[in-house]
Amino acid sequence: MKIIKVNPFTILFLLVAFGCGLIKNALIIFLIVLIHEAGHVFFSLLFGYPILAIHLYPFGGITIVNKDLNTPLGKELLMASGGVMMQLGLYLSLFLPFFSLHTKNLIFLYNTSIMLFNLLPIIPLDGSLIVNCLLNKFLSFQKAYRGQIIISLVGLILFLVYGVNRSLNTFLISTFLIYKTFLAIKDEKFIFNRFLLERFLKNFPFTKISTQKGNLTILKKDTYQYFREDDKIISEKIKLKEKFHQYQG
């Protein structure tokens, strides 16, 4: 199966750049995007998560990894930050003697622009994934997901108001970000139920334990939950079994 999938707009972007005599610019941008995605791939494979696809767009890429929603936060954070970490290493190329000053300036400009763009806290950019990891450190999975969406919407509005110039590329970027944020809102219930189903079907090696009153919406990543009900202590497995029992034939 072909893992790397080049978007048709990416091919169009390269053809237009070549036609305008901007071959070096286009190749540098494309190389930076590949290096960025290589960072995500490296940490994903390091932790044993298969790569399903790498989508390459004119403005960046998305690496789709086969992993659980209950993946440990430490691993999630490294996988989300891998692209930016690789781009930081790319600055070392500026010290290589065989690059001209013009080429070094292009590498610095495009690498910085792509890295800062990816750090924006807008779904599905790396910045939003990092925000989600940080929120999950302190909040339940559901609250962290909703918080990620709220922050993404605020960031998206600011990006549309202050960060957009009138060009085809920025129009495509804005449309893509709006679409992905809309999907995240639309899929909230599905994502949460998938999170719960994973907890029901699998035994994750959680190192933290919490006991409190509440329902399944208080479940946190990296934490096994016990529920205090009257004089009883009920494990999350029992609560999850009660929820999914109604779907069994």
Image (cartoon, rainbow, N blue to C red):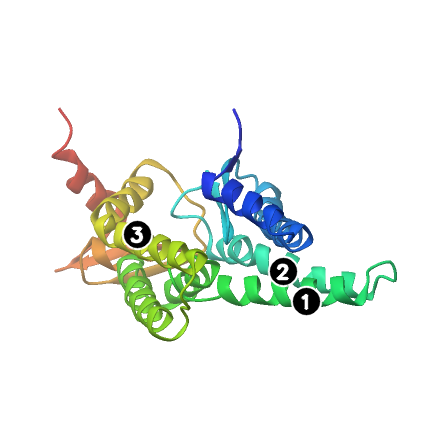
Residue 214, position as x, y percentages in the image: 18, 61
User: What residue is shown with label 2?
Assistant: 85
Q: Which mark is residue 81?
A: none
Closest to the observer: 130 or 114?
114
Task: Give the alpha-carbon distance from disc 1 to disc 3, as whole Å.
Answer: 30 Å
Label for residue 108? 1
Q: Is residue 115 above or below residue 66?
A: below
Q: Would you call the spot at circle 2 few (<14 residues within 10 Å), some (14-19), or many (20 or more)?
A: some
Amino acid type shown at disc 2? Met
Name the one closer to the observer, 49 or 175: 175
Which circle, 2 or 1, is nearer the viewer? 1
Q: Secondary structure at mark 2?
A: helix
Mark 1 in CB contact with mark 3 (< 8 angstroms): no
Q: Earlier in the sequence, mark 2 or mark 1?
A: 2
Q: Quadrant of the C terminus?
A: top left
How far across and down, in percent of the image, does residue 119 sit?
A: 49, 65
Q: Earlier in the sequence, mark 2 or mark 3?
A: 2
Q: Which residue is mark 3?
A: 179
Q: Residue at x 33, y 63 (%)?
A: 148
